[in-house]
Image (tube, rainbow, N blue to C red):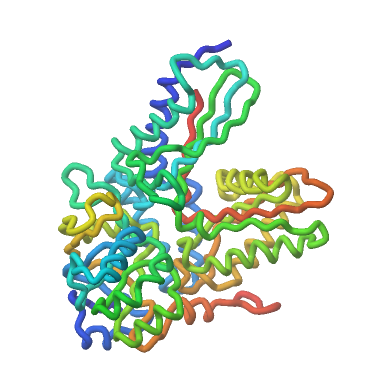
Amino acid sequence: MREINVDLVTKTVEELCIEANYKLPADVKKALEAAADMEESPLGKEILMDILRNAEIASKKRVPLCQDTGLAVVFLELGQDVRLVGGDLYEAINEGVRRGYTYGYLRKSSVDDPFLLRKNTGDNTPAVIHTTIVPGDRVKIIVAPKGGGSENMSALGMLKPSDGVEGIKRFVVDTVERAGSNPCPPIIVGVGIGGTIEVAALIAKRALLRTLGEHNPNPDVAALEDEMLREINRLGIGPQGLGGRTTALAVNIETHPAHIASMPVAVNIQCHAARHREAVI
Amino acid sequence: MTKKVNTPLSDETVENLEAGDRVLISGIIYTGRDAAHKRLAGMMERGEELPVDLKGQVIYYVGPCPAKPGQVIGSAGPTTSGRMDSFTPQLLDRGLKGMIGKGTRSKEVIDSIVKNKAVYFAAIGGAGALLAETIKEAEVVAFDDLGPEAVYRLRVEDFPAIVIIDCHGNNLYETGPKNFKLAGEEKQP
């Protein structure tokens, strides 16, 4: 058993919240540069250049890329040979979020109840925490701040198995078309197929963590990712929804075994400020 | 082409703007998003005086980040405008002339923009650090308790935006993507 003090978890989460919000991941920057080169719409090209300039300013001045610094979504991979000491793990994560959002001058975007008073909690807690237990004696922490604009355009459908690949494609492409300009395109489309209702949504979100340019290891699923990306970029929505070829930078699909009667499909939309940062302790 | 626009907006300025124009906005603008709109609507319903005279003014849908020491304001890009749609026509009837946000508007809002000779601009969503550089002064003028959702008075210089819906009802979100949509088997040129 390896002992880890939860104070280290707090400190790590604090740093990850700040760095994730100040720095655009290198793969996203590269994808945006490639899109700016290819974009046929002059206005679309200018917008992509402005988005890249924004990332430069944010990184240089150490300020958030976007004012919506998100709800703090935390993926925790906990090695089964780790013994956590020094306090409550989830409280330690929330303390990290509290410190990161306060000391990093990040916006606090969490309300305490969803439909009554909607009072801001003032420190961006609670975090949304997803834990998996894995072999080993390490703890991997991924912080993925998620903005409201793109999250609101996401969708979940309980499709019938007979809807097949065509049904899945239609559901995903229609969701993106309906979203239009709202989720700040160019977007990244996370798709979760299979499992139960909550698994589909969770793997769709997890799909957003994948490095751009990498495909699902199953060649059939990888081919579907390419096909859906092509179809989405034929919609003409373009950067910021003002017309152009770059509507999405990637479609990432994750799958899970499902019930004989079910084919859930979740689409989690991510804006171009596709923030996530990880550390292993 | 890029046009310079000064606030408050006159009828003449608004008439001169067309969907698709790039603009640089200078002058005073006010922030307001979900919670502030809800409060303003409540005040209007009760016949109370609003904290800001809306005549000729521009509302920017934004909830900025807190300012770091030495900064005027934190990152400050637009939020999705559609959530303000149900409140917007009554504000336009009160004299509001312009809105800055991102994303589509309802038919009721577009009709009200035409009726009141107003304009809807978009700023680049997700470019909060870039846009904050054009904000030279910021002061909370109402609803301080709402934190990032409070109403701020901002003085901006050459704030970059794009005219989306002009006073004739032309809508760049309709016309822009149409030029690039590929149908059926049509190949990308």
Q: How many marks?
A: 0
The residue shown at (43%, 81%) is B171
Is residue A193 shown left or right of residue A60? Answer: right
The single residue placed furthest to the front in the displayed view is B46
Quadrant containing the N terminus of chain A in the rendered view: top right
Q: Position of residue B129 (x, y in %)?
A: 30, 53
Q: Quadrant of residue A189?
A: bottom right
Q: Nearer the viewer, residue B9 or B94?
A: B94
Is residue B109 shown left or right of residue B182? Answer: left
Is residue A226 shown left or right of residue A26? Answer: right
Q: Is residue B124 above or below residue A72?
A: below
Q: Nearer the viewer, residue A253 or B95?
A: B95
The single residue placed furthest to the top in the displayed view is A1
Q: Is residue B147 visible?
A: yes
The residue shown at (28%, 60%) is B131
Q: Is residue A234 above or below residue A274?
A: below
Q: Position of residue A14 (x, y in %)?
A: 38, 32
The residue shown at (67%, 43%) is A199
Q: Nearer the viewer, residue A201 or A61?
A: A201
Q: Quadrant of residue B29?
A: bottom left
Q: Position of residue B142 (x, y in %)?
A: 20, 58
Q: Is residue B157 visible?
A: no
Q: Position of residue B184 (x, y in %)?
A: 69, 78
Q: Is residue A31 above or below residue A175?
A: above
Q: Is residue B55 above or below residue A127?
A: below
